[in-house]
Amino acid sequence: MTIYLLIAGGYLLGSIPFGVLLTRAFGAGDLRQIGSGNIGATNVLRTGRKGLAAATLLLDGAKGAAAVLLARHFVPQLGDHAAMIAGAAAMIGHCYPVWLKFRGGKGVATLLGLALALAWPIGLIFAAVWLGTVLLLRFSSLGGMLGAVSAPVAAFAFDYPVYAVGLAGLAVIVLWRHRENIARLRAGTEPRVGAAKERA
């Protein structure tokens, strides 16, 4: 029963669509009808509201972190497994929210948040790879994907086997959610950060 509660609680927390709620509340329109239709911070940025984009990024990350921290607090007897299960459920909730007919975000910010909460060195490497790739190559999508892939590698290197397995599975989900971006990167048509018609 405890495992089911972790999954349900994490999923419901992760499924809160902060990007949609914020853009609607501040009169920026229906995020699902803007740009790529994605509910994450990158698409919020296309509304021209940088503050809302930053808030979305932080809140989406906070969902993953909160799920991990709450699991550790309320189910300490399950240790790393509880934290990983709750965090994974939160990310899946973000990517496939029931409230939006399972059409959610791509999971990068939520994955970063839960990685930081699991073990900050893992999250720090994730963030460094993500930001470094964006700054060097100007591809937001590639930065997110490489950051996600770096997380299980870092977890393995720092001897967190439970996290390594869980984060590897979540990295696969991130890659799947970016499949259209991968196709555009292969074709040389993926816009760089700052391009007028950038898509997430």
Image (cartoon, grey):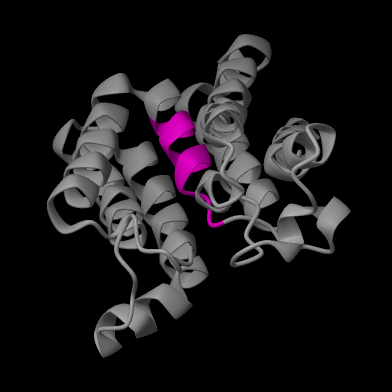
Residue 157 part of the magenta-drawn span: no
Magenta span = 106-115
Q: Quadrant location of residue 129? A: top left
**Most foreground residue, 69 or 109:** 109
Q: Quadrant of the N terminus?
A: top right
Residue 66 rendering spot, x and y as whole percentages: 60, 21
Query: Residue at the spot x=37%, y=38% of the render?
Result: 163
**Would you say the magenta stretch is mainly helix, strand or loop?**
helix
Query: Residue at the spot x=41%, y=36% of the render?
Result: 112
Residue 7 appears in the picture as rendered: no
Residue 118 rendering spot, x and y as whole percentages: 41, 25
Query: Residue at the spot x=55%, y=52% of the render?
Result: 46
Residue 113 part of the magenta-drawn span: yes
Residue 50 appears in the picture as rendered: yes
| 57 to 183, vertically: above or below | above
Spot the residue most to the bottom: 187
**Most foreground residue, 116 or 31:** 31
Spot the residue most to the top: 73
Q: Is residue 38 left or right of residue 197?
A: right
Residue 74 rendering spot, x and y as whole percentages: 68, 13
Q: Is residue 73 left or right of residue 30?
A: left
**Most foreground residue, 146 or 8:** 146
Query: Residue at the spot x=25%, y=84% of the render?
Result: 188
**Most foreground residue, 66 or 141:** 141
Residue 34 rendering spot, x and y as whole percentages: 68, 61
| 35 to 127, vertically: above or below | below
